[in-house]
Amino acid sequence: MTSPSAPPALNATLERLEATIAQRRAADPDASYVARLFAKGLGKIAQKLGEEGVETVIAALSESREALVGEAADLIFHLAVLLAAKDIRFAEVLAELDRREGVSGLAEKASRAEKAARKG
């Protein structure tokens, strides 16, 4: 499953990451960080993603370019774990980005607010 707009190397990297997470998900939690996260549950996985998001922001504001690259990699990794926990593939996320391409960010936010108001 690849997104038409993402470069092939990006798709391949994300697909390998998904495969690695799927493989390690069922491993021994004492031998695999991924398995340990899954054993602790969705709340812990979400918490780790939040922590990595904060660390990424801190690196962007006050650390080196290399630190930001490292934190961004950690953030994407933990996002991949969270998506796997919810049975969502990166291809779905990339397809949503493709759908939004060319749409004003303000218009996209307004359409989501309208949908939420109709549901509420």
Image: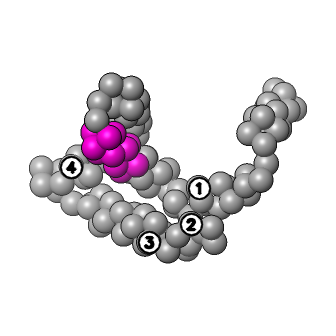
The answer, for residue 90, to whether it is visible in the render is yes
On screen, residue 113 above or below 68: above
Q: Nearer the viewer, mark 2 or mark 4?
A: 2
Q: What amino acid is at disc 3?
A: Ala
Q: Nearer the viewer, mark 2 or mark 1?
A: 2
Q: Which residue is mark 1?
A: 93
Residue 106 within the segment the image draws in magenta: no
Q: Between disc 4 and disc 1, whose residue precedes?
A: 4
| Marks 3 & 2, CB-CB < 8 Å contact | no
Q: Between disc 4 and disc 3, whose residue precedes?
A: 3
Q: Which mark is residue 6?
A: 2
Q: Secondary structure at mark 1?
A: helix
- Determine the CA span between mark 4 and mark 1: 24 Å
94 sits left or right of 115 in the view: left
User: Residue at point 79% right, 48% down?
Assistant: 103
Residue 69 within the segment the image draws in magenta: yes
Q: Which residues are magenta?
A: 65-77
Residue 15: image location, x then y, percent: 43, 69
Q: Which residue is mark 3?
A: 9
- Determine the CA span between mark 4 and mark 3: 25 Å
109 sits left or right of 1 in the view: right
Depth order, front residue of 69/28? 69
- Determine the CA span between mark 1 and mark 3: 17 Å
Q: Secondary structure at mark 4?
A: helix
Residue 87: image location, x then y, percent: 50, 56
User: Residue at point 84% right, 28% down?
Assistant: 117
| Marks 4 & 1, CB-CB < 8 Å contact | no
Q: Secondary structure at mark 3?
A: helix
Q: Residues within 10 Å of mark 2 (few under 14, many from 20)?
A: some
Q: What amino acid is at disc 4?
A: Tyr
Residue 16: image location, x then y, percent: 36, 69
Q: What amino acid is at disc 1?
A: Val
